Image: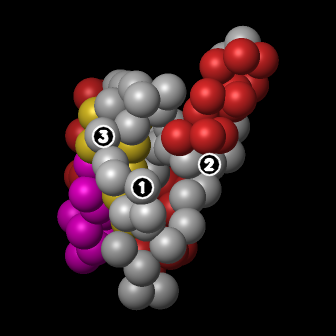
Amino acid sequence: MGSGPAHDSLHLAENGFRVTGVDWSRNGLLAGRNLYRREGLELDPVRADIRALPFRDGSFDFVWNAGVLEHFHDEDVVRIIREM
């Protein structure tokens, strides 16, 4: 969630995990896709508002974010956590 260029999750892809990067920034997602391609890996970039994710419940084994929640108001953080 809030993946930007997805460099923080690159280690997961290198170890065989399928990585879906979710961000509102189209440029960030494009940078992530390019980074993964250069490394011979695949990123599934999804442009979405993390307060209303376009995935069915239970779509992922785990959800991870770093450095995104502090950009939202408290009531939005609760909503984001529920979405994750």
Q: Is residue 83 above or below residue 18?
A: above
Residue, disc 2: 65
- Whether residue 48 is in magenta: the answer is no
Which is more N-terminal, label 2 or label 1?
1
Percent coordinates x, y for residue 1 in the rendering: 51, 44
Q: Which residue is mark 1?
A: 57
What is the x, y in percent for residue 75?
71, 16
Q: Nearer the viewer, mark 1 or mark 2?
A: 1
Please, what is the three-letter code of the amino acid marked with disc 1? Asp
Q: Position of residue 29 (x, y in %)?
A: 31, 40
- What amino acid type should be assigned to the residue bearing mark 3? Pro
Element type at mark 3 = loop
Q: How far apart are labels 3 and 1 at the CA level?
A: 10 Å
Q: Residue at x 28, y 73 (%)?
A: 41
Q: Residues within 10 Å of mark 3 (few under 14, many from 20)?
A: few
- Determine which of the numbered discs, if any, sits on residue 83 in the image: none
Asked if one can make out residue 73 in the rendered structure from this viewpoint, the answer is: yes
Q: Which mark is residue 54?
A: 3
Highlighted magenta segment, given as a residue range = 36-45
Residue at position x 50%, y 73% in the image: 61
Decide if residue 15 is on the left or right side of residue 59.
right
